[in-house]
Image (cartoon, rainbow, N blue to C red):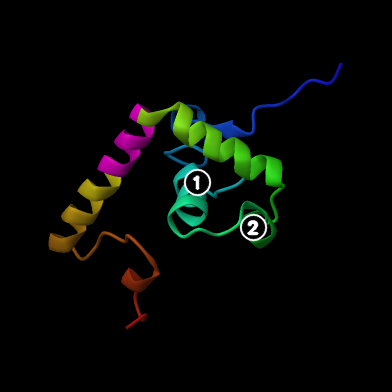
Amino acid sequence: MSKQMNTVVSGDESDIHDEPHIRDRRITVSHIHALVEERDLDARTVADRFDLTASEVYHALAYYHDHPEEMRAVEERRRELHETAKDDPSIITGPEDLPGSS
């Protein structure tokens, strides 16, 4: 009998990210959800783009839907960060905020 390792690490259990992500990777469950379910990219395309297996992509999507409260909290933290960043130019929310990117 094979033993399956959890594909997704919650933000509370992670040493590398503050939100759920693929184990040993920095790609978040939210990002996978956005690509597959909001942008309508095929799960295999997302897997190929990030050197993941299709199974890892589907596990991330299942995690997203199995943990709605946690995912809402992640989105709320992001919204708060972006709101705070509007008034504080030292907060980096994306590559466009890096020095020399204008």
In the figure, is residue 70 to the left or right of 65? left
In the orientation shown, which residue stands out farthest toward the left?
87
Q: Quadrant of residue 72?
A: top left
Q: Nearer the viewer, residue 28 or 62?
A: 62
For the N terminus, give its image quadrant.
Answer: top right
In the rendered view, tell whether residue 42 sits above or below residue 66. Answer: below
Residue beneath disc 2: 50
> Could you say where residue 102 lies in the image, as x and y percent from the top left?
32, 83
Q: Which mark is residue 28?
A: 1
Q: Secondary structure at mark 2?
A: loop
Magenta residue span: 69-76
Q: Residue at x 44, y 46 (%)?
A: 30
Q: Secondary structure at mark 1?
A: loop
If you read the primary sequence from the N terminus, does the residue marked by circle 1 or circle 2 appear first? Answer: 1
Near mark 2 (Cα within 10 A), the count class, few <14, some 14-19 or many ≥20, is few
> Could you say where residue 28 lies in the image, as x and y percent from the top left?
50, 46
Q: Residue at x 50, y 56 (%)?
A: 35
Does the magenta-highlighted stretch encompass residue 77? no
Residue type (three-letter) at the residue carrying disc 1: Thr
Residue type (three-letter) at the residue carrying disc 2: Phe
Q: Residue at x 52, y 41 (%)?
A: 16
Name the magenta segment's main secondary structure: helix
Distance (Cα) linking label 1 and label 2: 11 Å
How many numbered discs sit on the rendered protein? 2
